[in-house]
Image: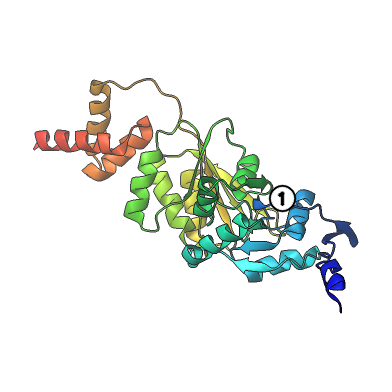
């Protein structure tokens, strides 16, 4: 080979990237450098968007929470893009490498096991640092369990607060629920099956008999949505074995009540103290009147002490 032939040689062309739709190969559009946050199905693989598929097929690599889970999705759509693990246990080491690749001109896709990345999943710090570094960040929106549950719960959707997972221990969980009691909107929680009954009991104790829904296995074969008051749902799920699958709890907003003056509050507390302990009386009155439990508990302590 002479020198002239050597200079004429070009790097091999990148093979065309495709994905399958009903068995037909569809070309994936070229991607600009950057971090592409892609939502994936929460159960039914048919919920994957065409744009999301194109991004996954065209990316230089896919950052996946669990590569074993993600391979099932990619195999369904004939996508061979390399997978790289990115999860809470390796993020500190994986994040600088990912940012470096993007800075060098690569296009990386970020996905979670299911649903929209960053919603109770790792990825926030990666996005934050990419933005801070001036790197492009785009999103391909799609499935999200919290929004899916909100849509089918039959509860107000004009205002809602997504809490994610509550603390695993009851005392801390009830403290957090109480802090959310006055939020003027529907509350949305994720919960593990093993804690569902206990969490519903704590929600009922702190929030009273608000209307609620438990959505389980959304978009999957055994999808189930149970609706009722918190106390009824707590009794229902506390009576049998823990259910299986991914669970979302949706709780209606507090009722709008007139402001409660001190005299009316004291009367409610005294009536409750006649049959309950200070702690339980405060919880009952707080739930009934839609007031912070700490405020009611402090007043209940004072009244109980004065009565001695």
User: Which residue is at 53% across, 48% downward?
Assistant: 133
Of residues 7 and 177, the one nearer the viewer is 7
Do we see residue 208 in this rendering? yes
Dot 1 falls on a residue whose secondary structure is: loop
Do we see residue 22 in this rendering? no
Callout 1 crowding tier (Cα within 10 Å): few <14, some 14–19, many ≥20:
some
Of residues 139 and 194, the one nearer the viewer is 139
On the rendered image, what quadrant is the N terminus found in?
Answer: bottom right
Task: Using residue 85 as the reference point, say whether residue 273 is left or right of it.
Answer: left
User: Which residue is at 46% across, 30% downward?
Assistant: 184
On the rendered image, what quadrant is the C terminus found in?
Answer: top left
User: Which residue is at 49% across, 59% downward?
Assistant: 239
Up-down relation of residue 115 to residue 60 (above or below): above
Task: Using residue 293 as the reference point, say whether residue 7 is left or right of it.
Answer: right
Quarter location, residue 147: top right
From the top left corner, tell me how far across and down residue 106 is, in percent: 67, 58
Q: Residue furthest front?
A: 3
Quarter location, residue 245: bottom right
User: Which residue is at 59% across, 53% downward?
Assistant: 117
Q: In the rendered image, which residue does mark 1 sit on?
A: 32
Q: Residue furthest bottom?
A: 1
Of residues 274 and 6, the one nearer the viewer is 6
Of residues 111 and 91, the one nearer the viewer is 91
From the top left corner, tell me how far across and down residue 98 is, in percent: 58, 61
From the top left corner, tell me how far across and down residue 187 is, in percent: 50, 40
Give the colouring mode of the picture.
rainbow
């Amino acid at each position: 080979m002479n020198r002239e032939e050597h200079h004429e040689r070009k790097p091999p062309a990148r093979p065309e990237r495709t994905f399958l739709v009903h068995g037909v190969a569809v070309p994936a559009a070229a991607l600009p450098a950057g971090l592409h946050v892609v939502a994936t199905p929460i159960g039914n693989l048919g919920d994957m968007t065409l744009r999301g598929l194109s991004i996954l097929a065209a990316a230089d690599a896919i950052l996946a929470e669990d590569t074993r889970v993600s391979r099932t999705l990619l195999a369904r759509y004939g996508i061979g893009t390399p997978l790289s693990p990115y999860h809470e246990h390796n993020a500190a080491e994986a994040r600088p490498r990912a940012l470096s690749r993007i800075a060098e001109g690569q296009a990386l896709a970020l996905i979670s096991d299911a649903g929209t990345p960053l919603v109770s999943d790792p990825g926030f710090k990666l996005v934050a640092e990419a933005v801070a570094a001036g790197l492009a960040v785009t999103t391909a929106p799609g499935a999200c369990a919290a929004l899916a549950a909100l849509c089918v719960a039959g509860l107000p959707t004009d205002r809602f607060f997504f809490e994610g997972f509550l603390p695993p221990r009851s005392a801390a969980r009830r403290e957090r629920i109480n802090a959310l009691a006055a939020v003027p909107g529907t509350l949305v929680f994720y919960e593990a099956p093993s804690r569902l009954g206990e969490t519903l009991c704590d929600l009922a104790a702190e929030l009273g008999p608000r209307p609620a829904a438990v959505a389980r296995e959304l978009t999957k074969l055994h999808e189930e949505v149970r609706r009722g008051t918190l106390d009824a749902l707590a009794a229902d799920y506390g009576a049998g074995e823990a259910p299986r699958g991914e669970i979302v709890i949706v709780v209606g907003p507090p009722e709008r009540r007139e402001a409660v003056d001190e005299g009316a509050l004291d009367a409610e507390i005294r009536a409750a103290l006649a049959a309950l302990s200070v702690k339980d009386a405060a919880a009952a009155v707080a739930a009934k009147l839609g007031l912070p439990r700490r405020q009611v508990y402090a007043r209940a302590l004072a009244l109980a002490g004065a009565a001695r």
